Structures are given as structure tokens and as C-alpha cells.
Image (tube, rainbow, N blue to C red):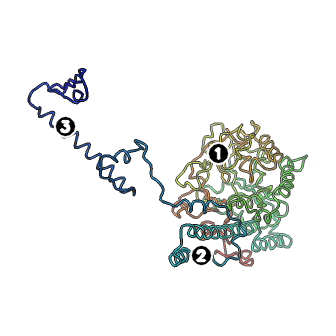
Amino acid sequence: MQLHISPSLRHVTVFPGKGVREFIKVKVGSRRLSYRMLFYSILFFTFLLRFVFVMTAVDTIDGERKCSTIGCLGKRLRPKILGRRLDSTVPEVIYQILEEPIGKDELQGRSDIPQSLDEFMAEIKEGKSDAKTFAVKLRDMVTLLEQRTRNAKIQEYLYRHVASSSIPKQLHCLALRLANEHASNAAARLQLPSAELVPALVDNSYFHFVLASDNVLAASVVATSLVRNSLRPHKVVLHIITDRKTYYPMQAWFSLHPLSPSIIEVKALHHFDWFTKGKVPVLEAMEKDQKVRSQFRGGSSAIVANNTDKPNVIAAKLQALSPKYNSVMNHIRIHLPEMFPSLDKVVFLDDDIVVQTDLSPLWDIDMNGKVNGAVETCRGEDNFVMSKRLKSYLNFSHPLISNNFNPNSCAWAYGMNIFDLDAWRKTNISLTYHYWLEQNLKSDLSLWQLGTLPPGLIAFHGHVHVIDPFWHMLGLGYQENTSSADVKSAGVIHFNGRAKPWLEIAFPKLRPFWAKYVDFSDKFIKSCHIRAS
């Protein structure tokens, strides 16, 4: 075989030849060696040498044996291009020891386990241990520290659960003093609102806000912050809904602390005609839910005693036991159309929010026929807080959930919601909500674990109008990473989570944003030893 290359390097011709000698013979069209051919030949060999040098250098850095001959080039080039791989230098016995299971009780009472990395290194160096001894000591030390860390985390979650679920003695004191004031002071029993202002309660030219709470101090902060930041406080109507036991303290507080010119209405659930007629589906569901939880969960002691669950799973189960998740104050929002039959639109506020701006522009938002104006929680600068999708709340391993919903659909937040009650009355949202509550009870609470948000996400699915995140900043009750500047610039801040601002476990950096709306010089506040910090 003969290879013929033209002087211009544009044509290559192969002729049949004889033997190996003929195969390597190259005929050039010109008797003189072309400078161009010489240049390309040098360029090719330069590239080849550079390639060999780089691959040799990489292998040397990776820790392989040095190799200076072309004969071992294939070994160096074996993939990723030609099958190249790195052999582990860790003795196999270390993997064997570390993979051996070890029981929890095996480490109890042993004094030979290193308690720190420094102690471990000192023992290894002094004893000049072999690989097996090294692995055994390392495994025992890491396992012991892991067990202690797990126990510490679980204890922390248990203490937080107790702290967040209990009523602080200061709040209990406030309710008792106000109830006593209601009984002994006629000024604390004033009709709210006064008779001449009652027509405003059903006048749709006003801005109607609804707050459901059994916490007098929390309700006072929401009301005060709402009115103080309103540009037209005389057009604000706040409907406060509470339960039977809190009604008298709540009425006493707002009778003695009027927020004129705004209009405050205080009503207990039993004051609503609709609520007292027939059966209320949400109350029936709550009664069944309470019974199921008491049997299914086994209480906090059973949850903490579980040795297989991870700490974050235990934390979620403890949170599911919180009384607020089975509180009528949380569930009652699903009955707003029946409770306020004369109103076209309301803004619903949770009692752990603080209003920092005028909220009247919310009435100018075009809802495009949707029922619920809410902030989405799947996108935003804070990835920790704004990363919630349906899979964050619903159990998609259950076919009833996976067959009906998309796990990656964006979730939205309760806490500050615009509800178009007219549009709501034309839907089956409330019936859908009750249907899924029943399904969750029938499945032993396996569709979701806690709260009113999961059934709300289902019931309002397809009926949500997304509003600007400015109107609702979340997460101030379970993390303090949000900067003070961002908190100040938000329209409404929400202390959702365990660390409520009226509890001792509140984050010191964030509590002042709530405390600024509490008058700590008030005689009821002072007498119950409620302090700014």
C-alpha cells in the first residue's frame, strides 16, 4: 500500500502495495520537501507531546505510580477515554468494620471509647494501631457521638413542643384579669361596635378584615398594627371571632382599648346563628380528628421513645400534636361565606402576624374570578422558607394523593389572604375541604400529618390568585436568618412556626417587630408581668 500526498496537502491517494515496507512508504508529489508539510508535521508532533505530558501529569497528581515510557501510556489513558480508573488505597478491612452493624446498648457504659477527635488521634498514635483497630475505634466513637447528638436534638424538639403548646402563665393571667374586669366594670361590657356603627358591619364600601383568635394579646397586636398603619382607619372594620371561654376577656380588652375611628366587632362562635343551627361539618371532623390522633399517635412520650425515626421526623410528629392544629380557630376560615353572608370580600388575618403597611390596596387587586388571593411559597430569595410545593405537605406515596395532584405544584400561604366571598359561593370549595378531611381520617391521617393548610391547598386548588410576596413575609416563627432590613420592608410579617413572639422561645432579633405594638405600661400588661424581652 502506498500513500500519496499532493504538495498542496489537498489530495491524498492510497495505492495497493506489498508488505509492511510498502505500507509505510509515502510518496510526495514534489521531490523537494514542502515547507508547509514540515510545518504541519511539527505542529502535529507538538500537540502529541503536549497531550502525553498533560496525561502523565494528571496521573501523577492523582497518586498513581510514575510511568515514563510510552509502553504504559495505555494504562494512563484507559477511560474516561479508554477505561481509566483509580484503585482505592484504603484497606478493605476498614470498609468491613465500618459497615458492621452495632447495637445501641453495645456502647453503653464503655470507658474505652474516645470522646473527641484529639483523644482519638492521641490513642491511635500512641498505640501504633493497625487498620482494623483504627476502624473499630473510629466506628465506636462516631456512633456514640451520633447517638448523643440524636438524643440532644430530640430533647430540644420535645422542650420546644411543650413550650409552644402550653399557655404561658402571663397570657393566662391576662385572660383571668380581663374576665374579672368584665364582671365588675360596666365599661368593659360595652357593645362592640356601638349601635350607631352596626350598619358598617355589612357595608361593602368599608375594608373588612377577619381575625379568628383565642389569644387576647396576639389579637391586640394584629388590631393595633392594622389600624396604626392604615391611611384610612375610619374605613377599617375588623371582625374578631373567638371561642366561648375567651369572649369576655376579648370584649373587655377592646372595650377598654378602643381603636377609633376604626370599627371593632367581637363575636364568639356561638353568637353566629349559622353556627348554632344543625351540624357543622368542620366541628364533627375536628372531634373525629382528635380521637384518631389520641389513638394513632400515642402521645409525645411514645413519639420520643421511637428509636428508628430521624429527629426531624420526630419533630414533625410532635408538631402534629400541637393543640392549634385541632383548634376551631384554625378551621373556621373555611366557613367565611356562611358567617358573613352580606360581605363580598374580606381579608383574613392570622393572629401571629404584624401589619406594617396600609392594606387598603388589597381591595384594588383584580382577582380574575379567583377566590383566594395568596402569596406563593415555592419561589423567592429565601430558599429555606420559600421552597414549599405540594409534596412538602401532602403524602404522595398514598395513591389517593398521587393520582389527583402534581407534587411539584406550587404551594401558597395562609396568614394573610384575600377572599372573594362572592366567587367562593359559586364553587364547591367548602364541600371539597370537608370531603378531604374525611378521607384523611379514614386513612388514619396518612394523607397529611398536621394543620389546616394541606386540606386548604386541596380545596382551593385552581382557585388561587397569586399576589406579590411584599404582602406576606413568612417564616419568622421557625428561623431567624431573614435580615432585619427585609423584615422592615415587608407589608405583613408572619411568625408562623413554634417560636411565637409572645413566647420565651421567640427569636430575640425578631421579637421587637411584634413587641413595638404592645403597650407595656398598660395596667393589665404590667400586672401580669408581660415584658418587652
Across and down, in percent, residue 384 comes to 58, 56
Across and down, in percent, residue 407 comes to 65, 43
**Amino acid type of the residue that numbered disc 3 sits on in the rendered structure:** Ser
Mark 1 and mark 2 lie on one chain; the one further toward the N terminus is 2
Q: Which residue is mark 2?
A: 114
* Viewer-side label of 3, 1: 3
Please report contact status of discs 1 and 2: CB closer than 8 Å, yes or no: no
Give the position of the C terminus as an image quadrant. Answer: bottom right
Across and down, in percent, residue 237 comes to 70, 54
Give the position of the N terminus as an image quadrant. Answer: top left
Along the line of sight, the residue nearer the viewer: 443 or 507: 443
Mark 3 and mark 2 lie on one chain; the one further toward the N terminus is 3
Would residue 222 be seen by someone viewing this image from the given angle? no
* Residue 169 in the figure: left or right of residue 412: right
Q: Which disc number belongs to residue 373?
A: 1
Q: Give the crowd class for mark 3: few <14, some 14-19, many >=20 residues within 10 Å.
A: few
Q: Secondary structure at mark 1?
A: strand
Along the line of sight, the residue nearer the viewer: 193 or 50: 50
Mark 3 and mark 1 lie on one chain; the one further toward the N terminus is 3
Would residue 380 be seen by someone viewing this image from the given angle? yes
In the image, residue 168 above or below residue 49: below
Q: Which residue is mark 3?
A: 41
